[in-house]
Image: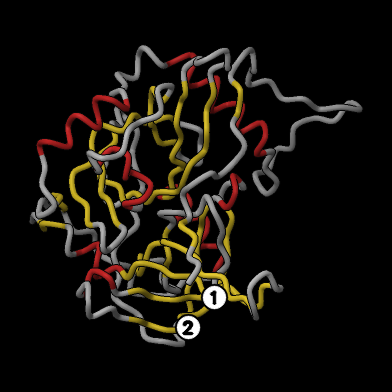
Amino acid sequence: MREKIMGALLSPLLTIGFLAFVPNYSNGQEKQSDEIFIDYNEFTRGIIQTLKTNRDQLQFVSSTAIKGRMSEISPSSKAEYRPITPRKTEMPPEELVEARTPGVLIICKYYKPFNGKAEMVDVIATAIVLSADGLCASNYHVFAQFIDSSQNLHPADSLTFAVNNKGQVFPIERVVAYNRDADAALFKITRGNVRLSPIPLGETLKVGSKVSAITHPNGNLYYYSQGYVNRNTADLKYGPMADRMEISADYAKGSSGGPIMNTKGNLVGMVSSTRPIYYAKNDGQQMVIRRTIPVKSIKMLLETKL
């Protein structure tokens, strides 16, 4: 079996250097007034400049400090959560994308200069806003270097932070709950005075149900795809946290922690991994099974507060 996690070695590293958030329109072109077409290269440059400009004011917690705070929680810890009423009516896909995109975050790392290499920012994964107070969800494997004491941070790993679709940067404070079998980790961000747009939790879906995803495959930010639930599987050796929902909506590396939603825009799962199938060793790939975490596993990491 060959299975690929979705949050490792994602997009090419982005050198900060002297990059500036300056639009580049050749041939006398002017910036479009609508938001249908987005220059994501410019968007990425904006992330870099925002980080450089506001790094001191944003009260970042270093990657080393986040790892140090893991001693304060146990594998049985749960995150406090104030329920959000799920949507009861269906939305056209274009309305769903508009409504839920603000609740999808980009997880980034800042690497300080090291061994002659320039400082860098790397887009590493996707995350989901769960509540207005800054509770978010992504994968265990995205945060494994913080959670697992046997894993070491890269010497240049300085900051880990989140970015929303407007390019606003949010420091990650700490991991607050996790489960390795579920491949799920919940964490808090410092939101300041920014109003977050959480995605409400839905219910587990049956095979054949329609789903959609918004993720960042290989650094291609805010990519929308649709599909169906292909299969719901269990692993009795590891228990209910190892349950998986396999879907046909497309995603790839960099999509780790991305939301899987029903036609109402409620969260029904989270991207975890892919399993490519080959006819024979070293032969052509025939298909890819895309495995996601059902929302019930995320709910088991929450302690509801009314």
Residue 306's quadrant in the figure? bottom left
Q: Which residue is found at the position 50% from the left and 14% from the top?
A: 113
The furthest residue to the front = 281
Q: Residues within 10 Å of mark 1 (few under 14, many from 20)?
A: some
Which circle's residue, 1 or 2, is located before the other in the chain?
Answer: 2
Q: Residues within 10 Å of mark 2 (few under 14, many from 20)?
A: some
Taking depth in this image into account, of 234 and 100 the one nearest to the observer is 234
Q: Which residue is mark 1?
A: 248
Residue 155's quadrant in the figure? top left
Q: Amino acid at mark 1?
A: Ser
x, y percentage for residue 52? 49, 15
Taking depth in this image into account, of 286 and 55 the one nearest to the observer is 286
Q: Would you place residue 141 above or below residue 27 in this image? A: below
CB under 8 Å between callouts 1 and 2? yes
Q: Which residue is found at the position 45% from the left and 54% from the top?
A: 256
In-image side of 36 versus 182 (left or right): right
